[in-house]
């Protein structure tokens, strides 16, 4: 079960920080659940309540084969007695389902939580929000509550407004990784006037500003730093993996390669380049993503690349 009480704030003492005139802290949303992303539970909280109040028995959502969101919906469904259906990109994964479960830790976890899968081609997946696609799903699975890919909707943003609290008011800057923009939007909405939010997109693309504006209305206390996507979504470099490994060795804090590793790398780089005013108090939001490491390591091993050390 997720436990938001576990999301504590700690100081980050890291030798990679060459500039000592600011202080760096981290909010451990990753500790909310041992395996599933903290921010994904925040995003699901009010969606689950809404599905319950509508009397729905089934949750349907979409994702890639290593998606943190898929793992989170499967776990939340199990905790709250929903049947869950994951529409997964990649029809080839259905060909040898036993092998898929053996080799893919995310889908294995979701399967063990009771999630059923519908594997679709990349082409069908692109069409997933169309009326035709949704009607076909209703034919196949009956009535359900639909959660969008990545989980971002109005109720998700409302859940992420609860990431900040009175404990975070002392910080001048709040830094967070950005995928679809739901998490940062909640943080923007609940930040105090003196706080500046910096988002680090984990992917390339310029749709995020519009998306975030849609959820945050008039607020202007934020910016995106697009310099740390490392080639795009789920792309990594040896430099990033090495950073994650060093950070873990020194701080005992595990970062993930898709979201939080890139964001923390970026913030450390900005601190070292004197981006922040002297005396700034900076808060990193560790959104989790730990479940994705095993899957990423499988991919990195195949490429003979450096892998993320676990222990
Ligand atoms: C999904 C995810 C994000 C991005 O959240 P959005 O609301 O999609 O922007 C950041 N970090 C982790 C670990 C995630 O799983």
Image (cartoon, rainbow, N blue to C red):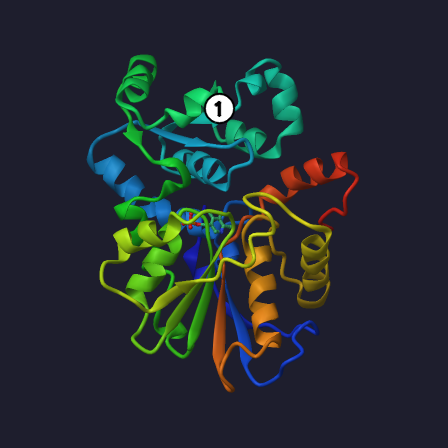
Quadrant of res 51: top left
Where residue 199 appears, x then y in whole percent? 44, 60
> Given the current orientation, which residue lies at the most extreme right position?
304
Q: Which residue appears farthest toward the left when viewing the image?
A: 54
Q: Secondary structure at mark 1?
A: helix
Q: Quadrant of residue 188?
A: bottom left
Taking the image as shown, residue 59 lies to the left or right of residue 7, namely left
Q: Residue at 44% x, 73% y: name it.
A: 173
Q: Examine the rendering and report whether any part of residue 85 can be seen.
A: no
Q: Residue at x 47, y 65 (%)?
A: 175
**Residue depicted at x 63% and y 81%:** 19
Could you tell me residue 125's position as x and y percent? 43, 25
Residue 221 x %, y %: 33, 69
* 270, above or below 148, in the image: below
Compared to residue 197, the image places residue 88 above or below, namely above
194 to 39, vertically: above or below? below
Is residue 278 something one can see in this rendering? yes
- Image point 31% across, 73% down: which residue? 192
Of 195 and 288, the residue lying toward us: 195
The residue that label 1 is drawn on is 122
246 sits left or right of 111 in the view: right
Task: Provide residue 114's location: percent of width, then percent of height.
Answer: 47, 26
């Amino acid at each position: 079960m997720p436990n938001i009480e576990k999301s504590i704030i700690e100081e980050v003492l890291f030798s990679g920080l060459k500039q000592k005139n600011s202080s760096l802290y981290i909010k451990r949303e990753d500790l909310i659940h041992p395996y599933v992303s903290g921010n994904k539970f925040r995003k699901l909280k009010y969606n689950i309540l809404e599905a319950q109040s509508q009397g729905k028995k089934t949750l349907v959502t979409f994702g890639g084969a290593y998606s943190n969101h898929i793992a989170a919906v499967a776990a939340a469904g199990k905790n709250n007695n929903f049947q869950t259906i994951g529409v997964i990109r990649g029809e080839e994964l259905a060909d040898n389902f036993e092998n898929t479960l053996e080799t893919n830790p995310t889908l294995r976890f979701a399967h063990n939580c009771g999630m059923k899968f519908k594997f679709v081609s990349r082409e069908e997946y692109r069409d997933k929000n169309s009326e035709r696609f949704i009607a076909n799903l209703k034919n196949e699975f009956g009535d359900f509550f639909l959660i969008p890919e990545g989980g971002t909707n109005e109720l998700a943003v409302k859940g992420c407004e609860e990431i900040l609290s009175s404990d975070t008011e002392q910080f001048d800057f709040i830094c967070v990784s950005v995928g679809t923009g739901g998490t940062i939007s909640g943080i923007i909405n609940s930040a105090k006037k003196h706080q500046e939010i910096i988002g680090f997109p984990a992917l390339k693309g310029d749709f995020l500003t519009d998306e975030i504006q849609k959820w945050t209305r008039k607020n202007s206390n934020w910016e995106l730093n697009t310099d740390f996507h490392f080639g795009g979504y789920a792309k990594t470099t040896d430099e990033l993996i090495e950073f994650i490994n060093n950070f873990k060795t020194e701080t005992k804090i595990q970062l993930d390669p898709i979201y939080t590793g890139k964001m923390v790398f970026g913030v450390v780089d900005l601190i070292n380049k004197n981006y922040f005013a002297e005396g700034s108090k900076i808060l990193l939001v560790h959104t989790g993503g730990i479940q994705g490491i095993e899957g990423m390591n499988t991919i990195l091993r195949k490429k003979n690349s450096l892998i993320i050390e676990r222990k």
